[in-house]
Image (tube, rainbow, N blue to C red):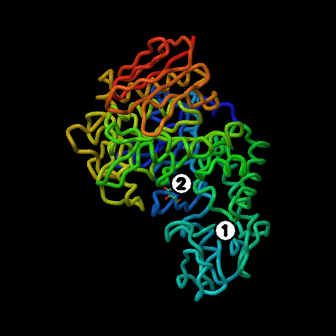
Amino acid sequence: MPEWLKQAVFYEIYPQSFQDSNSDGIGDIPGIISRLDYIRDLGCNALWINPCFDSPFRDAGYDVRDYKKVAPRYGTNDDLIRLFDEAHKRGIKVLLDLVPGHTSDEHPWFKASAQYEENEYSGRYVWTRHPFEGIAGHPYISGVTERYGAYMLNFFASQPALNYGWLNRTEPWMSAPDSEEAIATREAIKDVMRFWMDAGCDGFRVDMADSLVKNDDDNKSATAAVWRNVREMMDAEYPECALVSEWSNPWQAINGAGFHMDFYLDHWGNGYNTLVRDYEPGGEDNSFFRSAGHGDICRFLQDYLPKYRDTKDSGYIAMFTCNHDTPRPARTLSEAELKLFYAFLFTMPGVPFLYYGDEIGMKYLDVRTKEGGYQRTGSRTPMQWDSGKHYGFSDTDGEIYLPQDESTDAPTVQAQQERPDSLWHVTRQLIALRKEHADLQADGDFEVIYAEKGEFPFVWQRGSFIAAVTPSDRWVKTVLPVGCYETVFTIGSAAVNNTELIMKPLSYILLKRV
Ligand code: NOJ
């Protein structure tokens, strides 16, 4: 386990929307470099950068055309290497986004594999032998290649599935997971990983990590075996690099597949979803962090606690404010509610991820789809830095990547830095607290102290600290375990009288046992 993960606080950057340095209206790597001081001063010490590789951008870069080449619109490989160096100088680690399950249909491997003549890449993707048949119930395309067969899709129509084999094989064209062609795919991806780790990156966030071997069993054991092989390589050759999965099943991803940590994704009805996104647009909102909602922290805990207990000695659960696939929390939460959500997130175990712009509560915008974003596009708009042109994102006279927030109350970093009680300042204070106290970091002890269905506050212990949060719009109180407490940090207003904790509406308190 790379030691640095313990105290990591990640910042996710969607490169096309962070900072444009060459006035083409699209963010780029030199732009990210120019903002590294900002990220360090906010307190984040690790980055996750969404795919920045050559791509036709039909899925915002998750359709890779060349794994070893930075997309020209973002800069050059040398720029990315300079980003690693500059980040490291500031104590910041950098994770790249690895997309191992599929490529773009413009990738040279795919073009070769689609040819009539058999060649080195014929087995690199999942193909049937007949263009007039389906592909065992999976999405496919046929009729567009010289090759006789249909190819399987892993996501959008432009993303053919790479071939890691099938565990349960029902058709003659299904490769075994230990076949030569499946192993060759795995080794090709390891080669890509080595290429970027040799260049200085600190590991990978792995896209759809559970999607590799098809017709896998319920435990995804064949897919897990691929990752354990990758992890062995990393342990032997790059022990300080991290492997983070988009899997959302920590037991499978961490204990089975050997990932260092796993994302707890926003899936409808799961524990994470009940925190801030338990609503249908226009419908009732039952999220825990909505003060007017009738939140129930037990819905979160019932899902989270088994995941936490299963993996607390083997890896970390990663919780995020939002990501590029999820509506921004400010879509429904007020600034006061956002502060409480972040206070919770930054003082829970595991590793927190802050999505660019969430530190100022950037809004989810109603914008037209771009690069396969669809509903996700509203969370992908350019960063709002200051009161300058395009909020300091770009000085282009032309169009920018996506429209920005035109409302009079559009948040900017500059305005929030000038206001001492802003979300930006609270976020910064919370990150600083976490970095200052080992008990609040990824593997500090965690125990629930008070959680009742439909009641507030939620109280939990992290080593020698006790944290309590209440998003409710009424005064609440509860009794703490016997002890002496010192207040370390508050949002809103809360106080302890002997062991009675009294909290005003919308408050958070962090106490230390003395
Ligand atoms: C998950 C990524 O986060 C998402 O943005 C992408 O569209 C799909 N995987 C397909 O790669």
* Residue ID for mark 2: 53
* Residue ID for mark 1: 214
Quadrant assignment for the N terminus: top right
Pinpoint residue 505: horizontal percent, then vertical percent: 33, 27
Asked if one can make out residue 373 in the rendered structure from this viewpoint, the answer is yes
Q: Nearer the viewer, residue 454 or 168?
A: 454
Q: Nearer the viewer, residue 220 or 58?
A: 220
* In this view, 170 is above or below 449: below
Q: Nearer the viewer, residue 146 or 254?
A: 254
Of callouts 1 and 2, the N-terminal one: 2
Which amino acid does the dot numbered 2 rest on?
Phe
Pinpoint residue 122: horizontal percent, then vertical percent: 69, 75
Judge from the rendering whether residue 79 lies leftward or rightward of residue 125; answer left or right: left
Pinpoint residue 458: horizontal percent, then vertical percent: 47, 31
Which amino acid does the dot numbered 1 rest on?
Lys
* In this view, 222 is above or below 256: below
SS class of the residue under badge 2? strand
Q: How many marks?
A: 2
